Amino acid sequence: MPEQAKIMTLHDHDTGKPIAPRTVVEALSGEGKKWNYVGFAEDNVVGVVEGTWPCNRNLLDNWYFVGGGSQQDGGQFPINQRAKTKYSDTGYTIDRWINTVDSSSVSVNSQDGVLEITNPGNISFGILQVVDMKILEPMTVTLSVLYKGSVSIGYWSSGYNRTNKTSNEWDIAAFTYEIPTSYEPVYRVYCPHISAQEGMSVQIAAAKLELGSQQTLAHKEGDTWVLNEIPDYGTELAKCQRYQQVLSKWEGYPQPIGTFITLNAEGLTRFHIPLPVPLRCPPAIILIGSLRLEAVFPDENFITLSLDNTDGMSAELGVNSISLLKQIPGLKAGMVGRFDGSLNAGYIILDSNI
């Protein structure tokens, strides 16, 4: 819990003993707001001192879903490097979140500008995030979401453990449970699930996974739920780019990706790409469309080739870069140049997701 407001202790005039050390307001009126305390509100004046709302660390990445998505190129949440506004296939959707079944759909920008999950029926799972967290001892955790609709949240461990809630207004759903040391799914990590109930839809504004038995995602002020924190866009983007980076995805105009040099007469070529964030492991390399290679001979004659597959390509990670190696017929030893997405919006996905 964050440090509360500093409060002086009241002492008895005659005995000097403390008489009201951080007394909760409920002790006086029964109507006190949680985290408020009795103390010196002003010099020598006893009154209510407002504390801060607790806010545990969120173990999830890319957990704030308000804004319509980063594909709008304006720094809007959620981080959405793959740039689709609707995902209906199994696999990664917005960054760090996996759609677990083909028939379930994830819309990035719903009518209310938040994430929407639709479950057509008879499906247990919606989206999940693989949390890189080793379970060394039993852990009590709480998964919570700010939602509107019919939501199902939980985790998988020899069956789907979950809780269901429905609300026509924005509300909090929370599920507290213990992860045992025997929990060992694929990759030895932990996977919380968020879904709509069978045959329903749900809008999700935010989610949180935290240690302990209490949700600190949001608190209620009057009839309105208020998030205890709003994430920083740059921080969340960097966290997501550790697992995935999309290079040169810009419709209508090519962006430079990196440089290359051909190493031998057989066309073995090294592509060098600077990265904003180091990847967590050597990635799978996914090429969408084709790339344009512009090579320059020492006599400054240009040659342009198109790269449309990654067959035989390997990757080596540097500190803040990646090198790709591929044999390309048509390139000669000593050729150097740059490469970018062609006018058909070709791009590379470096996929280091767990």
Image (cartoon, rainbow, N blue to C red):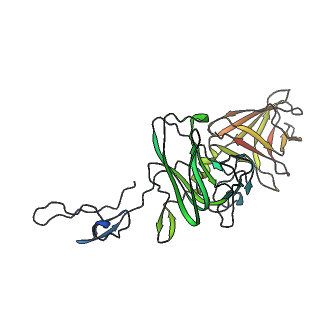
- Percent from the top left, x then y, of residue 128? 62, 47
Which residue is farthest left?
Answer: 14
- Residue beneath the point at 75% across and 45% down: 257
Q: Nearer the viewer, residue 283 or 273?
A: 283
Query: Residue most toward the front?
Result: 122
Residue 321 position in % (x across, y down): 66, 39
On the image, which quarter does residue 190 sit in? top right
- Residue 275 percent location from the top left of the image: 66, 43
Between 279 and 95, the one lying in front of the other is 95
Q: Which residue lies at the image location 28% right of the left edge and 61% below the top edge?
A: 22
**Which residue shows up at 72% across the image and 50% down it?**
82
Quadrant for the N terminus in the image: bottom left
- In this rendering, position of residue 173 left or right of residue 298: left
Identity of the residue drawn at 85% across and 51% down: 344
Quadrant where the image shows the C terminus? top right
From what the image shows, is residue 253 above or below residue 280? Answer: below
Q: Where 99 sits versus 166, above or below?
A: above
Q: Position of residue 209 (x, y in %)?
A: 52, 50
- Would residue 209 be found to the left or right of residue 87 on screen? left
